[in-house]
Image (tube, rainbow, N blue to C red):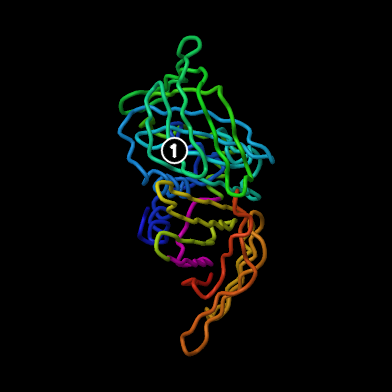
Amino acid sequence: MIRRSVFPVVLAVVALLALAPAAQGDPLALPLSIPSQLRALVRERTQSASPARSNFESRFAMKVGHGYEMAVIGRGEAVQVEIGRPSSLRQGPPEGPLIGTSEALTFYIARGTVTPRRIAASFGKFGRVDVRFKPAGSPVKSQSRHRCRGADHFTIQRGAFVGSVRFAGEGSYVTAHSHRVQGRVRMPLRLHCAPPRFHRRTASLQRALHPVDLGSHAFLSAFWRHGVESTDLFSFAVRKAQLTAAFTEQSLGSVALIHLGLAISKPTVLTVDDALTSATLTPPAPFHGKGTYGAAPNGTKTWTGPLSVAFPGAPRWPLTGEQFAVKVNASL
């Protein structure tokens, strides 16, 4: 588990990266509508459970009820279960304008056995995955990329994962029982290629959400840490939009549990007065309610209100309270 605050990482990533469709080699099954700066942060969080020492990725997905899908990914020495709505787990070009994006994902990560022919790991009270890969047909190659260091394409072998998949989320909000699931094994793990030229619409979205100097735009962060648990909330302007995101981390024995909630909306969801003495945050779904910040002349700060976020398996995660440390910056 990562023991340092997320916010210095966020600021560094935002300063260095522009919003663009994720590289074709992104090893996470995250939707391309998630901005690259958050994608890099989530990758750091989820990959901290185990470094990837292999050069392939195994993956399969299945419906698990209540409108959720579950993706199981084997990489390195870790097996990762991701739960989300189909739109959150979709891998492909973003559909529709990015303003209005709403994502909520839950990650369960455990060490296990990952080979080109097997995925196996125990997730404690949540269940277990132990399947073997049966190839079907010949491998296929993806479209070649340009200006690459090393491989310029993926080799994808499709087939079926056969064995046992047993998984139940908190309170059985999702359940999975299967002995055969279609999936694939892909090599290499990622491509190291220059980004492709974007078509006009994508380039326009990139310019609209290019990260800018956070020192001159409304910004709010709130976080708390206690033992092996943490919650991070931040909201900042990226030109014509406001990006609000929440992360939580928990260590449940041998399982790392991570939640991610994200909304891209109009900047009006965050208001900060020029004196930096008050602020309100009212982000859209998957968030609910309003957070209110106040700073008194004696230096005390308050962060109150019914603001929460709905994660898969944790529908009302609180995002305010005296345990949070809060920072606010006003727009010019």
| Left or right placement of residue 15 versus residue 159 in this view | left
Instruction: Please tell me which residue lies in front, 292 or 52.
Output: 52
The residue drawn where x is 38% and y is 43% is 47
Instruction: Please tell me which residue lies in front, 258 or 268.
Output: 258
The residue drawn where x is 51% and y is 35% is 198
Q: Is 221 included in the stretch rendered in magenta? A: yes
Instruction: Please tell me which residue lies in front, 40 or 192.
Output: 40
Q: Residues within 10 Å of mark 1 (few under 14, many from 20)?
A: many
Q: Is residue 303 above or below residue 211?
A: below
Q: Secondary structure at mark 1?
A: strand
Number of marks in picture: 1
Say whether residue 327 is visible.
no
Q: Is residue 319 above or below residue 119?
A: below
Quarter of the image holding residue 70?
top right
- Tell which residue pokes out farthest to the front in this image: 125
- Tell which residue pokes out farthest to the right in this image: 66
The span shown in magenta is: 209-225
The residue drawn where x is 55% and y is 73% is 321
Residue 8's spot in the image, x, y percent?
Answer: 38, 61
Residue 36's spot in the image, x, y percent?
Answer: 47, 45
Q: Is 215 included in the stretch rendered in magenta? A: yes
- Tell which residue pokes out farthest to the top in this image: 137
- Tell which residue pokes out farthest to the bottom in this image: 298
Q: Is residue 99 above or below residue 153?
A: below
Residue 110's spot in the image, x, y percent?
Answer: 41, 41
Residue 113's spot in the image, x, y percent?
Answer: 37, 31
The residue type indicated by label 1 comes to: Ser
Say whether residue 305 is visible.
yes
| Left or right placement of residue 74 versus residue 83 in this view | left
Q: Which residue is mark 1?
A: 122
Instruction: Please tell me which residue lies in front, 203 or 135.
Output: 135
Q: Is residue 111 above or below residue 99?
A: above
